[in-house]
Image: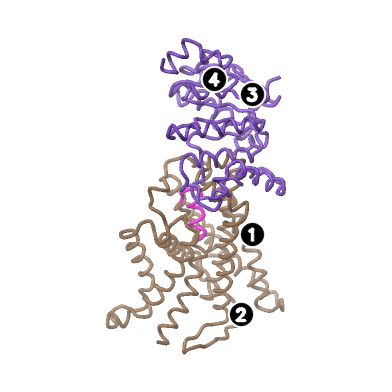
Chain colours: A brown, B purple
């Protein structure tokens, strides 16, 4: 029982991070029908920038509490990632508006590789450790343990996601985003500047990605130029699982995927008599992706694909 | 001076010349109709007026200003509003959200609420369903949403593209009642229709468009009696 609960807790931490990233994929898809495969790299850049700032502050002997140092890093990383997201859309995707769908898709993959290479130029190929500035106190309940940091990650993710959903459902900007995703030319007739809405979508998604990147870095105590690839793919899977284009679906898909992965990794050893171990954790996300694509391609909360055409 | 003045407008669509040099004008307070067969260039003309399609040559002046180079999302702020063909409802927004999209370019929140209440007065049906997703409404109700939404944009000139398209005859009658109602509110309108008889009956003036050219124009009553119009468009 305690292993089960432990895996659920681990899954929630992982899942809320996936959900935050999945929102970035699904928002962009909802507005322009494009899978922004470079989104994982934005997450990586968020982690890298934060670690760089935190390390610089620590090395300079700044004596502030750990969370404050982290917050400073985060407040640099968020606008930095927003700028990257804005620029990506402007120089890579906007010129391809109206091009066949394959063109922006290939561009996205190219962008992903380019951003990784830029990260190598700046930070090198090695893992960059996150300095031990954060409280690693563990809270135990019902035999399962979770760090205070992880509780914070879950709570922050839920707060941000709720804020985003409220923004999209209740504000004028959110209404314009939904209108644009349904019919950009009519939204334009209503006075919506479609280009600005698309930029805003990239900027918001990238900001969420930056926060997620920092969470990954603090949770695993490190960052790496390649970290965005796998986590991006998994978050994309989460978005597809929930129904791509559907914000609530991204949250649901992310959390479900995190839990499935954790449970899978926790029990795969027992189930296969020790033949496969928890290092097969990464397989589960893609098994889920394949199953969703076969049995419910529109995702858990998505509508039939024909409706989106 | 006319509210809208179009001079020698030409539009080419992927190598095909859809509009071949037309002239027309609309005065303040008028309801003018543009009738013609499918493919005559009516919709293209409307789309060109709001910048959704680029003109090849000619001049369009609205409210005393040349409209060249204005972005399509800026026309609504100048009072040029279009209800597109097929109504252009946001199916997954509620009725009220759809209506409020009409007021997107405005900031006077209090006044918007007053006008929203007025729209609900005009269309009690919409008030009953204000929380319903617009995609679940009937075609006639969707047209009410489209008209209400357009009115919340405070049009100086309202362009209506085939409002009766795809609707049952009894609903079409209703739509034309709505058009009369909106005209009575003092909104200047350009109505593009295939249903020539109804369109001419509600309008003061009309133009007939054939293969990209305006071939006839004048008083709507006279057009209704014109032999060529009767033969070609009124099925007599």
Q: Residue B202: x percent and y percent?
A: 56, 24
- Which disc number belongs to residue B10? 4
Q: Residue A186: x percent and y percent?
A: 54, 40
Q: Is residue A27 magenta?
A: yes
Mark-to-mark CA distance, 2 and 4:
68 Å
Q: Residue at 54%, 20% (x, y): give it.
A: B10
Nearest to N terminus: mark 2 or mark 1 = 1
Q: Of residues A146 and A88, which is closer to you in this image?
A: A146
Quick check: B79 above or below A146?
above
Q: Which residue is mark 3?
A: B30
Q: Which residues are magenta?
A: A23-34
Q: Of residues A61 and A142, which is closer to you in this image?
A: A142
Q: Residue at 58%, 14% (x, y): give it.
A: B218
* Quadrant location of the C terminus of chain A in the rendered image: top left
Nearest to N terminus: mark 3 or mark 4 = 4
Q: Residue at 41%, 54% (x, y): give it.
A: A303
Q: Of residues B218 and A205, which is closer to you in this image?
A: B218
Mark-to-mark CA distance, 2 and 1:
23 Å
Specify whether disc 3 shares its chain with disc 4: yes
**Secondary-structure class at tag 1:** helix
Mark-to-mark CA distance, 3 and 4:
24 Å
Q: Residue B14: x percent and y percent?
A: 45, 26
Mark-to-mark CA distance, 2 and 3:
71 Å
Comparing labels 2 and 4, the label whose residue is closer to the camera: 4
A57 relative position to B147: left or right: right
Chain ID for label 4?
Answer: B
Q: Which residue is mark 2?
A: A134
Comparing labels 2 and 3, the label whose residue is closer to the camera: 3
Q: Which residue is mark 1?
A: A79
Specify whether disc 2 shares its chain with disc 1: yes
Answer yes or no: do the residues labelled 3 and 4 have beta carbons within 8 Å? no
């Amino acid at each position: 029982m305690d292993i089960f609960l432990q895996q659920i807790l681990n899954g929630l931490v992982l899942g809320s991070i996936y959900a935050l990233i999945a929102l970035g994929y699904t928002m962009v898809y909802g507005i322009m029908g494009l899978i922004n495969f470079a989104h994982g790299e934005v997450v990586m850049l968020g982690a890298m920038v934060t670690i760089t700032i935190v390390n610089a502050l620590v090395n300079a002997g700044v004596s502030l509490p750990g969370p404050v140092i982290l917050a400073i890093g985060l407040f640099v990383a968020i606008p930095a990632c927003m700028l990257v997201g804005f620029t990506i859309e402007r120089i890579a995707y906007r010129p391809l508006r109206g091009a066949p769908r394959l063109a922006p898709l290939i561009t996205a993959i190219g962008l992903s590789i380019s951003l990784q290479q830029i990260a190598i130029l700046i930070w090198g190929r090695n893992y960059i450790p996150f300095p031990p500035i954060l409280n690693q106190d563990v809270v135990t309940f019902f035999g399962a343990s979770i760090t205070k940091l992880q509780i914070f990650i879950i709570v922050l993710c839920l707060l941000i996601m709720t804020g985003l959903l409220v923004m999209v459902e209740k504000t004028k900007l959110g209404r314009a985003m939904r209108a644009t995703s349904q019919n950009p030319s009519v939204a334009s007739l209503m006075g919506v500047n479609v280009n600005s809405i698309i930029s805003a979508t990239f900027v918001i998604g990238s900001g969420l990605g930056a926060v997620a990147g920092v969470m990954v870095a603090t949770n695993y105590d490190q960052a790496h130029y390649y970290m965005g690839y796998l986590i991006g793919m998994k978050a994309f899977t989460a978005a597809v699982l929930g129904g791509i284009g559907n914000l609530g679906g991204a949250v649901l898909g992310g959390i479900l995927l995190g839990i499935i992965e954790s449970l899978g990794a926790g029990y795969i050893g027992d189930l296969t008599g020790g033949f496969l171990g928890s290092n097969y954790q990464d397989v589960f996300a893609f098994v889920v992706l394949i199953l969703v694509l076969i049995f419910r391609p529109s995702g858990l909360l998505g509508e039939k694909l024909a409706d989106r055409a | 001076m006319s509210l809208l003045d179009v001079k020698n407008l030409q539009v080419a669509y992927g190598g095909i010349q859809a509009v071949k040099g037309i002239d027309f004008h609309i005065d303040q307070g008028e309801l003018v109709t543009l009738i013609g067969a499918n493919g005559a260039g009516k919709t293209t003309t409307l789309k060109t007026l709001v910048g959704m399609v680029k003109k090849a040559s000619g001049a369009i002046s609205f409210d005393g200003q040349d409209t060249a180079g204005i972005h399509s999302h800026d026309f609504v702020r100048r009072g040029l509003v279009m209800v597109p063909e097929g109504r252009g409802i946001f199916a997954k927004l509620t009725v009220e959200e759809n209506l409020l999209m009409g007021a997107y370019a405005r900031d006077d929140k209090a006044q918007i609420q007053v006008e929203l209440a007025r729209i609900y007065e005009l269309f009690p049906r919409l008030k009953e369903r204000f929380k319903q997703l617009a995609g679940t409404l009937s075609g006639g109700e969707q047209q009410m949403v489209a008209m209400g939404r357009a009115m919340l944009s405070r049009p100086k000139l309202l362009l209506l593209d085939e409002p009766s398209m795809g609707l049952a005859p009894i609903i079409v009658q209703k739509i034309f009642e709505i058009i009369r109602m909106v005209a009575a509110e003092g909104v200047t309108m350009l109505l593009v229709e295939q249903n020539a008889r109804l369109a001419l009956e509600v309008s003061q003036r009309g133009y007939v468009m054939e293969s990209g050219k305006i071939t006839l124009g004048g008083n709507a009553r006279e057009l209704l009696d014109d032999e060529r119009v009767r033969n070609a468009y009124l099925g007599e």
